[in-house]
Image (cartoon, helix red, strand yellow):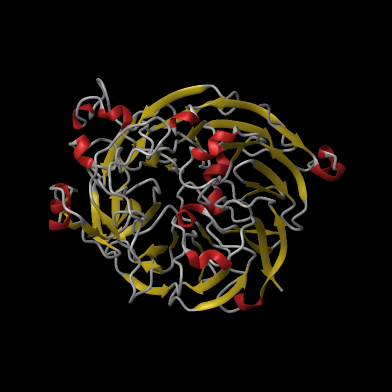
Amino acid sequence: MTPNYRLVGGLIAAAIFSGAQAQGLDALKNDAATPGDVLTYGMGYNNQRYSPLKQINNKNVNKLQPLWAYSLNNPQGQESQPIVHDGIMYVTTHNTTIALNPLTGKQLWKHEIELPQDVFKMACCGILNRGAAILDGKIYRTTLDAHVMALDAKTGKQLWKSKAADYQDGQAMTAAPLIANGVLMTGIAGGEYGTRGFIDGWDPATGKKLWRFYTTAAGNEKGADTWPGDTAMKGGAPTWLTGAYDPELDLVYWGTGNGGPWNAEARKGDNLYIASVVAFRPKTGEIVWHYQFTPNDPYDYDATEVGMLVDMKIEGKTRKVLAQANRNGFFYVLDRANGKLLAANPYVKVNWADKIDMATGRPVESEVTKRIRAGGDEEVFPSVLGGKNWTPMSWNPATGLAYANTLNISWPYQFAKPEYKKGEWYLGVNFRGVNMPKDAPHGYLSAIDPMTGKSKWQMAWPGQPSMAGTLSTGGGLVFTGAATGEFMAVDATNGKKLWQFQTSSGIIGLPVTWEHKGKQYVTVLSGAGGVWALLGDERMANVPAGGSVWTFALN
């Protein structure tokens, strides 16, 4: 089927966009330092989700009011991060790309994607999209049926569309692309379906595929000996979130996901490069270094949320590091030039491993994991959802803290016999959901010291834990959202809630802030769903579905 686009309300694109300026690679490099716009996923190549804007601050945030709301006309979960460039906001859903006037919320154009109906039973976990990329007058996005496309930023007209994989194998695309050193890069989802993960490099002008790096090593590839037989061909290591980029080192950092099947006894060995971060050259896809957080991962401890690139002082010396709150419950700090481990400490309750061996970088598995590998049935912390799920954390250079929505949930775990069937989950475990503690909160907004894993403060979520991202600002604030729809600002120094507003649905997306003519705005998508909805929490019955975009400013 051919996608279609339309200009809504008879608007003439030439008139609307007559002042639009194409932006190049230098603008992407400077995104973190230009708070007037949002050009990259992560609000900068460093993925820190920090803005120096401070017009809205911890003294006046109580005067924040909604400026406009735009209905996405979509009942699915909304995890998209808006892009803001030259007076236009771009937002994605699983089947639309929309251009809005960011000051009024008025729709400028809307491009619709016609997806095959059977794609919805193949995509794990949630029918959604997480955002777009922008370069030289083009908007780039991925689709659930595993395609990459480019749209004209002025009109929404489709310029090219390229196929990355066969969605009927269980592979899907939901992440925002990353553009670095002239190459458009995308990952792939589908680690639960017996697929083989990869990262692709594309020509942003034509959609021609430039290279592919497979994230399970096979054949003559280095690391192939970490997989028995041909298990790497169905070994998982999906790459379903967006990476980060250091232009000075010319290294892209991308996180990889779980091994397939979850039953690790079916693939004995370290299984490179599952549950890892890989650092590679954007021009060629050539790997420079890797660090594997959870070798032979049995617990679906994805490392797909790559973390943040931070320059921080360690033992009196400023180091260029990559900081990741891994789903396995440990907070890692790596030298991002070479992958050397600098710190690894638990930031949530962990019982699957006793510690991380600083000499080898490997986890020291606990008696719980040893009993599971011997066929036992055990309660494991953290759960399949991880110590932190997919949503990114943020960084504040003034406090030196990472702000993340963390989880306090376990799960019952026992191996079962894996059986591969095309297009079906390939797990090999007795999956029985997760366990919520009865005497403690199920999750927190946590202010974490990266070097120790300890929280300076925590704000407990009273009911459902939050699966939303966080945004930190120079105004001493952390913005985030609740599963029940409250958008809020808390004090970055002590976690005190300073302001909140009830949106129309649950929040599982990524807030951003930007300015126009000296006025600061904050935008977030509302729309319950995602992985939490798949667990069937009956407490969400009073949270209506329905996606919308909200923008706020001071009264």
Front residue (pair 439, 350): 439
Q: Let me know if residue 260 appears in the view.
A: yes
The front one of 467 and 125 is 125
Q: Is residue 527 left or right of residue 328?
A: right
* Residue 515, quarter of picture: bottom right
Q: Quadrant of the N terminus?
A: top right
Residue 274's image quarter? top left
- Looking at this view, name the residue that lies furthest to the right: 10
Q: Where, quadrant-wise, is the C terminus in this rendering? A: bottom right
Q: Which percent across, then down, holds residue 395?
A: 43, 61
Foreground of the two, 393 or 192: 192
The residue drawn where x is 48% and y is 37% is 122
Tell me if 190 is positioned left or right of 549 in this view.
left
Query: Left of 71 or right of it: where is 238?
Result: left
Q: Position of residue 234 (x, y in %)?
A: 32, 30
Residue at the image point whose x is 31% and y is 60% from the top: 313
Which residue is at 78% across, 42% downward?
A: 17
Residue 414 x/y as whole percent: 23, 50
Q: Is residue 60 above or below residue 403?
A: below
Q: How many marks?
A: 0
Left or right of residue 280, residue 513 in this image: right
Instruction: Report x, y in % for residue 496.
Output: 48, 79
Q: Is residue 402 visible?
A: no
